[in-house]
Each structure stands twice: as structure tokens, then as C-alpha cells.
Image: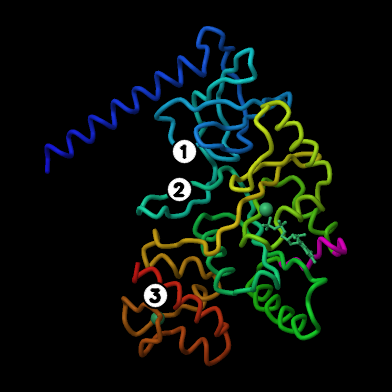
Amino acid sequence: MAKRQKLTLQQKRRLAERQQKKLETDDIDESGLSEAKQGLVISRFGEQVDVVDENKNIFRVYLRQNLGSCVSGDQVMFRTNDNDSGVVEAIEPRFSELTRPTPHSGIKTIVANIDKIFVVVAPFPDYSSLILDRYLVACELARIESEIIFNKTDLMTDEQLIFFEDQMKIYQSIGYVVHKVSCKTSNQIESLKQRLLQHKSIFVGQSGVGKSSLINSLLPEAEILTGAVSENSRLGTHTTTASRLYFLPDKGYIIDSPGVREFGLSHLEPEQLIDGFIDLKQQLNQCKFRNCRHLGEKGCSLNAALETQEINAQRLSNYQKIYQSIISK
Ligand SMILES: Nc1nc2c(ncn2[C@@H]2O[C@H](COP(=O)(O)OP(=O)(O)O)[C@@H](O)[C@H]2O)c(=O)[nH]1
Ligand SMILES: [Mg+2]
Ligand SMILES: [Zn+2]
């Protein structure tokens, strides 16, 4: 067993060495590299990233081996060559990051250096408060401020409008800023824009809720940057599988992210989860058992808070569902 493992490690190392050599000899002309300069990562494509320099020139460059993860929003030091290519040499420390688990028990950084997360939901694809709460938990635990966008209001039937008004009230009463918008009619898009300006934000949410459409409505000029990247790198258009950063007119930026159906939280310790539910946490008041999991145990203070309607039943139920999903991972 030990021998086999050793071989594998050796093989891995050789492979890495070969790749590194290939990277340096084939793709990067080391002698022609510029001085290191500061850049901002717009998007990641496999082993390459698009980096923008202070003059808003965009380069598709390689990553030095052992650099660690490099994602949209990362501040980097990089060098370029005459072919609009180059290499990232260092990643600056991040002031924030949003992470999620990988299928193999690892943790993946999705985005770096953001100060606000907009969670987008809509009547289509089917709205789920559980999915919304999963995102909100991730935001709270990353200590990044979040706001909620209810998009596609133009598609809501009268019945749905009543339901969604009710949902919005739940989140507003917790303290979340809620936006009720439509890309189709541009309803409330301008007031949403005011909340974005000066910030470094990301749009997250299920695929199809309208994240990319929102960015197009908010920043028609964002198209220009998209075009510029494709032309500059000569590598065709961008896939929707990668996150992508767009500059706001003055300061700040907005990052469009690909949708994930359910935001994974399996990397959390179950007892961390309550910190992600700010409303429930506030109402915690000495449960009978010190190690209470708040799953309906006798003497749980959240049962009492539910009875006096200090907390919302849907939120408690979602907390319990997520808790169960973490312990059954
Ligand atoms: N009726 C309506 N359709 C919308 C609205 N916003 C987006 N869509 C449509 O929803 C679909 C998915 O939008 P997209 O922006 O690609 O979603 P994303 O996967 O979250 O980026 C597209 O067909 C959009 O035209 C809206 O406010 N109203
Ligand atoms: Mg999209
Ligand atoms: Zn309890």
C-alpha cells in the first residue's frame, strides 16, 4: 500500500514537473516578460486567468505553479510578454472570500474581495426559500453583507404576488434589504443600481433566475468589456461556466457567477449553522440542554420563540433541514 502510494506521488510530481516545463517553455517566453505589475482578476479559465491592469488593458495569462486558487476579484502581481500573454506571480491577501465545498471534501474559493452579495431569486426556475436560506447562511458565515433580489416580477400572477410579498416581508423583518425587480420592464432597476455603486459585489443564485440579464440591464456598457476581452485574447467568447467581473462606472465592480442549484454547506460544522441564521441566533436564550441542536428538543428556546412568533416557522424549518443535511453528509 505504502509503495503504491509513493509511486503515485512520484508520478504526480513528474507530471507536475512536465506540465511546469511545458508551461514555461511552450507558453511563456520568460526572457520577454515585463516588470511585475498590479492587476485584478476578471475571470478564470482552467489554468489561465484574464487580468486587467491599471490602464484597463486585459491579458489572458498563466498561473505560476503552487500559487493556490486564483479567482475573480483577486488582486495579483503579474508580468506580460509581447503576445498579450504572461504569468501571475503572486496573489495579494484577500479581505473577503466566498467558499463552497468540492465533491471531494475540499473547499473551493468562488470569489475574492467582495463587500456585498446579491442573492437572486425568481418565480422561474421554481422559488425555494431553502435554497435562498442556504445562500444567506454562506454570506453570513463569510461575514459579507447580503441583499436579496426578487427578479421577474413581470411574470408573477396575482396569486404569486401575494406569496412573494409575504416572502419579502419575512426577510425584510430579519433586516435584509430586499429588491423587487424585473429586467423585462426595468422596474426598480435604477434603485438597485444605487445599492451597487461604489461596492464590490457578486450576483449569486440558481441558474436561470436572471443574474446575467440583471447585469445587462444595470450596465448596458458591460457588453463593451465582454467584447474587448474576446478580441484581445483571441480565444473566442466566454463560457457561462466561469464567474466574471464587470466594472461599475465610477468605483467598484459587479461579478456575475454561474448558477449552482444548491449552495453546498457540507463543509460546515453543524454547530456553526446557527450563526448563519441571524434571526434565530438572536432569539437563542438558554436552551435546556447545553448541547441543544435546536431540532425540536424539549426545552429548546427556539420552540418558545416560535410560539410567541418571535421567529418565523419557515426559517426554523429551513435551519433544521440544513442541519440534517450537514450531519447526514
Ligand atoms: N420575463 C422575464 N424574464 C427574465 C427576466 N430576467 C431574466 N429573464 C429571462 O430568464 C432567462 C435566464 O436569464 P439569465 O440572465 O441567463 O439567468 P442566469 O442564469 O441567472 O444568468 C433568460 O431567458 C432571460 O431572458 C425578467 O425580469 N423577466
Ligand atoms: Mg448567467
Ligand atoms: Zn435549542
Whole-percent x and y of residue 210?
72, 60
In the depicted structure, whether residue 14 falls above or below residue 299: above
SS state under label 1: loop
Please provide percent x and percent y for residue 253: 71, 43
Q: Which residues are magenta?
A: 178-187
Q: Closest to the observer: 211 or 247? A: 211
Q: State whether residue 255 is above or below residue 310.
A: above
- Residue 147 seen in this snapshot: no
Q: Secondary structure at mark 2?
A: strand
Q: Which residue is mark 1?
A: 69
Residue behind mark 3 = 324
Give whichever of discs 3 and 1 has the lower sequence position.
Answer: 1
Which residue in the rendered view is the most extreme toward the front? Answer: 236
Verify CB contact (< 8 Å) between mark 1 and mark 2: yes
Does the image show residue 324? yes
- Quickly name the residue at label 2: 108
Instruction: In the rendered view, tell whether residue 291 sits above or below residue 193.
Output: below
Q: CA distance from mark 3 to mark 2?
A: 22 Å
Residue 134 vertical position relative to residue 5 in the rendered view, above or below: below
Residue 204 drawn at (x, y percent): 62, 57
Which residue, as the protein is rendered here, is positioned at the far top? 31
